[in-house]
Image (cartoon, rainbow, N blue to C red):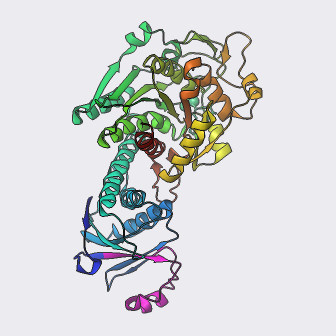
Amino acid sequence: MIFNFKEKKINSINADFEIILIQDKKLEKYTQSQELFKLSNYKGEGVCIDMQNKILYSELKSLEYEDIRFAFASAYKALKKLEIQSIKTKSVIGKCVVNSFNALIQGFIFGAYEFDKYKKEKTSSRLENIYISQEEINNKTYNLEEAYVGINYGKIFSNACDFAKNIVNEIPQVYTPTKMAEDAINLSKNNPKISCQIYEKDFLEKEKMQAFLAVNRASIHPPKLIHLSYKPQNAKIKVIFVGKGLTYDSGGLSLKPADYMLTMKSDKSGGAAAMAIVKGASELNLDIEVHSIIGATENMIGGNAYKPDDVLISREGVSIEVRNTDAEGRLVLADCLSLAQDLKPDLLIDLATLTGACVVGLGEYTSAIMGNNEDLQDEFYKISKKSGDLTTILHFNPHLKELIKSNIADVSNTSSSRYGGAITAGLFLNSFIREEYKDKWLHLDIAGPAYLEKAWGYHSFGATGAGVRMCLSYLLYLSRNKK
Ligand code: BES
Ligand code: ZN
Ligand code: ZN
């Protein structure tokens, strides 16, 4: 998709179609389409196509960024079926110019996304040229430089999300840990600012990553530990992301019921997001060193599978009683978080589709933010809110911590209660965070929004790129505010 910002009035731009945003359901001024509105009973909600005048009307519920995204995504979805190549629209300015243009671009790119690789009939659209007029829907004036910045951010954020989505949507037969490592290598080959190191099984053995290795044991595909980094010369701080890269989670010997196993190709969403964040950070040219460490493996069954009752010694030296092999993500993360702390981060953030409990508790739309530092959580929450990713904070407490005590090891991989599973999983991870990093760590459980079985808002079926926008927004915020 090509975005052209035109420093002129909309009427002097030539395009096959025009998008007009409807605010407050006010339709009176569009005299050319009054008959159509009446005939089609259009009251200003959703979209309405006027083929004769080549206008697509799309409702803009408010000037909130999320509504801007939705209005343009809906417009693009309606127009992409048509045999047209270009469209034009006025600008929309909400609270901040940069964020508004970022949201507008995201709307188009999210509206266009489809994973149709395995379909004979592709819905490939010819609608590639988007002209954005400087003219604003409410005649606001604004700094044009900020518009260009916002458009650039929008492209970077959306392309990073598409990158993560393509990884998550790919099928488990194709998308093995080896494939994930190849994608990481290709990312670094295509971008000279990114470097990539792949660590094999012998490295995990040498590093005594028994927890990670145990999860991998029954898989025919070798594990891969992926380390991507972006190190600008002027870096002020170092942020490390750790991603859960379960290319398939069958549950292991504590096998998932058939219904629950379906969609578990999406258990690599945290890892995919971590890769996409490095891509985005480098394209944004941030003055922050950004690393991503991804633990890639399958969780399968077989004669050599790890078992409930096993005790594993993690890289940190903390022993883990395995009570359920389906609580595997936390085992992989425990060892990856250990390695990440050796790199001395100023901020350490893990992303994982960690618990079904998080989906039960928060619904399918929201990710959880956890950690020990409330100020950090609050700050991250505030920034994430504008990014398009929905989040909420879940607080730890000492009573829940009691529930992961083990009679035989330092910690149990499952809680003794069926309640509070998202937080007890977070507390499990906390057992592997060293004292000096306790306040520098955030855990993001993206299990709900990472993968959709039903499209909602401007997201299509399947992967959403959950986590990417909130983390990139937070990195941008850090780059601006933490000098
Ligand atoms: N990958 C799942 C969590 C999950 C569930 C992600 C649904 C996305 C949608 C994770 O490995 C898991 O199975 N967790 C168990 C933990 C339990 C055994 C303590 C769960 O949530 O049921
Ligand atoms: Zn599992
Ligand atoms: Zn899992």
Residue 468 is situated, as x and y percent measured from the top left of the image, at 44, 43
Look at the image and tell me in which quarter the N terminus lies.
bottom left
Look at the image and tell me in which quarter the C terminus lies.
top left
Seen as rendered, the residue at the extreme front is 483
**Which residue does the image show at 25% across and 33% down from the upper left?**
193
**Which residue does the image show at 39% across and 46% down from the upper left?**
161
Q: Is residue 382 left or right of residue 20?
A: right
**Which residue does the image show at 52% across and 15% down from the upper left?**
214
**Vertical relation: 324 (above or below) 23:** above
- Magenta-tinted stretch: 18-47
Where ligand 1 lies, by quadrant?
top right
Asked whether 150 or 224 is in front, the reply is: 150
Q: In this orientation, does residue 382 appear?
A: yes
> Does the segment drawn in magenta span residue 46?
yes
**Vertical relation: 25 (above or below) 157:** below
Q: In this orientation, does residue 121 appear?
A: no
Seen as rendered, the residue at the extreme top is 206
Tally of marks: 0
Q: Quadrant of residue 289?
A: top left
Residue 100 is situated, as x and y percent measured from the top left of the image, at 42, 61
**Vertical relation: 99 (above or below) 160:** below
Asked whether 51 or 317 is in front, the reply is: 317
Asked whether 4 or 36 is in front, the reply is: 4
Residue 207 is situated, as x and y percent measured from the top left of the image, at 44, 9
Q: Quadrant of residue 317?
A: top right
Q: Is residue 466 left or right of residue 435?
A: left
